[in-house]
Image (cartoon, rainbow, N blue to C red):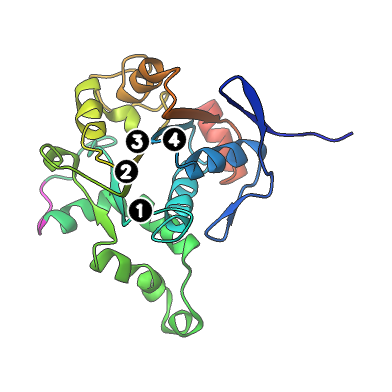
Amino acid sequence: GKTHLFRHDKGKCVPIDKKETHCNLKARNLEQTMALNLLGRSDIELCCIIGKAGTGKTILALGSALAQLGNEAGYYDRIILTKPVVDVGRGIGFLPGGIGEKMEPWMQSFFDNLDQLLPPTGSDKEKGAHKAESTWLPLLESGVIEIQPINTIRGRSLSRSFMIIDEAQNLTKHEVKSIITRAAEGTKVILMGDPYQVDNPYLDKNNNGLVYVVERMKGQNCFGATILKRSERSRLSDLAADLL
């Protein structure tokens, strides 16, 4: 009458704690438990989290990154966030400001999840919803959380970093190789996305960068992948992801 959860490790079945939590984040199903375990393993330097909209890919990655930031369990000095800039539908044209300001609309999915992981304090709540980001904003201003445009990543050497690349299904094979080869000693790379929701007109579900990495990295000791199928966002989101 009981169930147990295991992961395959060098020919053995290693048990996984079903109650594993990261940064006030608790898995809502067994799939998310598997993802959190994979994200928290120091021996896995490259991790792919695959799933449709609403399965919790972004919040799981961010929660795990925050939990391992500069503590005894992990030694990551910073969290690097990036995603391909691909318009859904018609583009909105030129965006004013510096790199950070130009990237802000594309990074909003990360910011929404940070609001949930690091909610405002009592005093911030009294100031209104506009101040909801104040608890994590200092991390962004100090560079502990860094926004990295993909088109300027070439030539960088990123050490002791927790890199999160969202919407990786919109990357080409060349782009995903350029990103992963930036990882220096002590860096963990997370690729997330849904192969069935490709917005890049030159890619499809079979030839995108996310699927390419999973296929090419199979069997490598430093690589791990898991698939999330159960949506936890809402009933409407789940229906839309399956039927539309």
Comparing 10 with 207, the one in front is 10
Comparing 207 with 23, the one in front is 23
Does the residue at mark 1 contact the one at mark 2 (Cβ under 8 Å)? yes
Q: Disc 2 residue type? A: Thr
Q: Which mark is residue 187?
A: 2
Q: Kindly identify the residue that appears in the image at 38 percent across and 36 percent down.
A: 45
Q: Kindly identify the residue that appears in the image at 17 percent across and 42 percent down.
A: 157
Comparing 64 with 100, the one in front is 64
Question: Disc 3 designates what residue?
Answer: 167
What are the residue bounds of the magenta stretch?
94-98
Name the image quarter holding residue 93: top left
Question: Disc 1 designates what residue?
Answer: 76
- The mark that comes first in sequence, 3 or 4, is 4
The alpha-carbon separation of the residues under discs 4 and 1 comes to 14 Å
Does the residue at mark 4 contact the one at mark 1 (Cβ under 8 Å)? no
Question: Disc 4 designates what residue?
Answer: 44
Residue 237 visible in the shown view: no
